[in-house]
């Protein structure tokens, strides 16, 4: 599979797995980036108009999500994270 170069200014990046899981319930996870540090992943989401509001709601404790959906998303992101790590 060929990887394309991402224009970093077009993406929101976080290394927080819990936040990334919450965001991924609403926006697709575009990439898992390990270029800065192979032991710390950055989760990249395409910047959208409502993304900042979602992140603020998360940090304020105002974001309400269905627990099972969140847990399933967390598992999916972990699976992608560990699958990416095994590749050279």
Image (spheres, grey):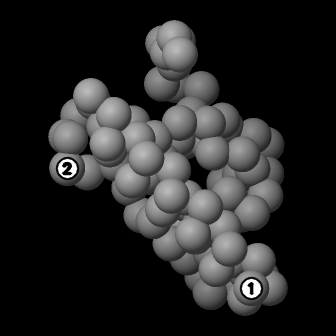
The residue at the point 74 percent across, 85 percent down is: 68
Residue 75 position in % (x across, y down): 57, 69
Secondary structure of residue under mark 2: loop
Judge whether residue 7 can be spotted in this image. Answer: no
Q: Nearer the viewer, residue 11 or 82?
A: 82
Label 2: which residue?
A: 39
Dot 2, crowdedness within 10 Å: few (<14), some or many (≥20)? few
Calculate the distance from the C-alpha at mark 1 to the C-alpha at mark 2: 28 Å
Secondary structure of residue under mark 1: helix
Q: Please tell me which of labels 1 and 2 falls first in the chain.
A: 2
- Left or right relative to 87: residue 52: right
Dot 1, crowdedness within 10 Å: few (<14), some or many (≥20)? few
Residue 49 position in % (x across, y down): 79, 43
Say whether marks 1 and 2 touch (CB < 8 Å): no
The residue at the point 48 percent across, 24 percent down is: 8
Dot label at residue 29:
none
Name the image quarter holding residue 69: bottom right
Q: Would you place residue 12 above or below residue 80 in this image?
A: above
Quarter of the picture holding the C terminus: top left
- Left or right relative to 87: residue 5: right
Judge whether residue 25 can be spotted in this image. Answer: yes
Label 1: which residue?
A: 68
The residue at the point 61 percent across, 61 percent down is: 76
């Amino acid at each position: 599979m060929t990887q394309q170069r991402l224009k970093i200014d077009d993406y929101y990046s976080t290394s927080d797995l819990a936040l990334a899981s919450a965001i991924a319930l609403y926006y697709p996870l575009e990439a898992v980036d390990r270029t800065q540090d192979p032991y710390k992943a950055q989760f990249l989401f395409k910047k959208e108009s409502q993304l900042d509001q979602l992140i603020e709601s998360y940090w304020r404790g105002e974001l309400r999500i269905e627990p099972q959906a969140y847990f399933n998303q967390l598992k999916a992101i972990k699976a992608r994270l560990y699958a990416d790590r095994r590749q050279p």
